[in-house]
Image (cartoon, helix red, strand yellow):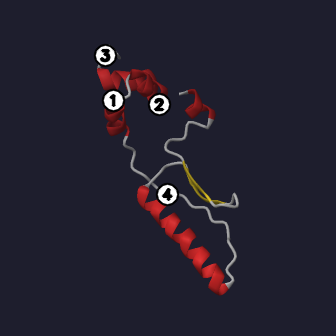
Amino acid sequence: GSCHKAFGTLPNMTWLIGRGGLILYKAAWTRPDDVVAALNESWGGYQRRREDSLMPAYSERMIWRAGEDDRFIELSKRAGPQAIEEMFGKDGLKQAYGDKGKP
């Protein structure tokens, strides 16, 4: 919807923010195993910092994901035609509901 568009239309954004406001992790596409790894890395870093005087360092990387538009459109039918149209436009509606473009 409008909030999704206001934040760049990136799907499934995830942020992990430490108590002091430091961004520990952010992703434009959420992968559960990646979030778990970030939590473990952050917690392990806090533990090691007490023992080894570690300093935080910034890192950025790209991951690759499979394009699952067909599956996403099928699952989005639960949310209704507006959800599909906002993500995929009229072509997505036609793919979901046939030539009529509506349920």
> Disc 3 versus disc 2: distance between alpha carbons?
18 Å
Identified by mark 1, the residue type is Arg
Q: Does the CB distance between marks 3 and 4 fall below 8 Å?
A: no
Nearer mark to the viewer, of 1 and 4: 1
Q: Residues within 10 Å of mark 3 (few under 14, many from 20)?
A: few
Query: Looking at the picture, does residue 84 appear above or below residue 65?
Result: above
Q: Residues within 10 Å of mark 1 (few under 14, many from 20)?
A: few
* SS at mark 2 in the image: helix
Among numbered discs 3 and 2, the one appearing first in the sequence: 2
Residue 78 shows which numbered tag?
1
Question: Residue visible at 54% across and 41% down?
Answer: 10
| Residue to which mark 4 is pinned | 63
Question: Residue visible at 38% across and 28% down?
Answer: 79
Identified by mark 3, the residue type is Asp
* SS at mark 3 in the image: loop
* SS at mark 4 in the image: loop
Among numbered discs 3 and 1, the one appearing first in the sequence: 1
How far across and how far down the image is residue 101, in percent? 35, 17
Among numbered discs 2 and 4, the one appearing first in the sequence: 4
